[in-house]
Amino acid sequence: MALPHSTFRELGAGAVLDLMVARLGLPLIVKPASGGSALGVQKVANVEELPAAMVSCFAYGDTVMVERYVEGTELAISVIDLGRARRRSRPWRSSRRPVSSTTPRGTRRA
């Protein structure tokens, strides 16, 4: 659920927060909607923590993302586009010799 800052102010903080907790339950993850990193991400375990988490996230931008908390490990994978043709790293055996790999054009010896 993305929540623009203007909506947060117009409806009143108390009403918005109560509706979010009623719809999503607790615990929650509150984070800035932009940025793409862990910067500003907060776990909210109880209703009393939610207002401060929202205000803190609005310091990063005008929109805050609120999600149900999911137990587990979060993985982030960065992708860098250098504007060149796609290349894959070759798979290696423990002997450090290249092995065959399948490419879109077929199988070849690496």
Image (cartoon, grey):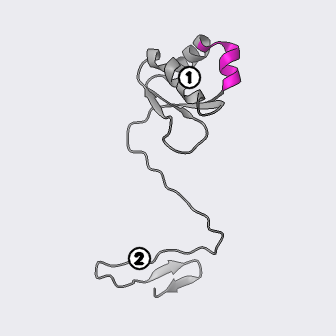
SS for callout 1: helix
Gap in angstroms between the C-alphas marked 1 and 2: 47 Å
Which residue shows up at 52% across the image and 44% down it? 37
Is disc 2 surrounded by few (<14), some (14 to 19) or many (20+) residues within 10 Å? few
Q: Are marks 1 and 2 in contact (CB under 8 Å)?
A: no
Asked which quadrant contains residue 9, the reply is top right
Q: How many marks?
A: 2
Query: Which stretch appears magenta?
Result: 5-13
Residue 13 in picture, x, y percent from top left: 60, 14
Residue at screen point 56% across, 20% down: 20
The picture quadrant where one finds residue 104 is bottom right
Q: How far across and how far down the image is residue 26, in percent?
A: 45, 23
Would you name the residue on which mark 1 appears?
55
* Residue at the limit of the structure toward the bottom, as seen here: 109
Residue type, numbered disc 2: Pro
* Disc marking residue 91: 2
In the rendered view, tell whether residue 75 sits above or below residue 20.
Answer: below
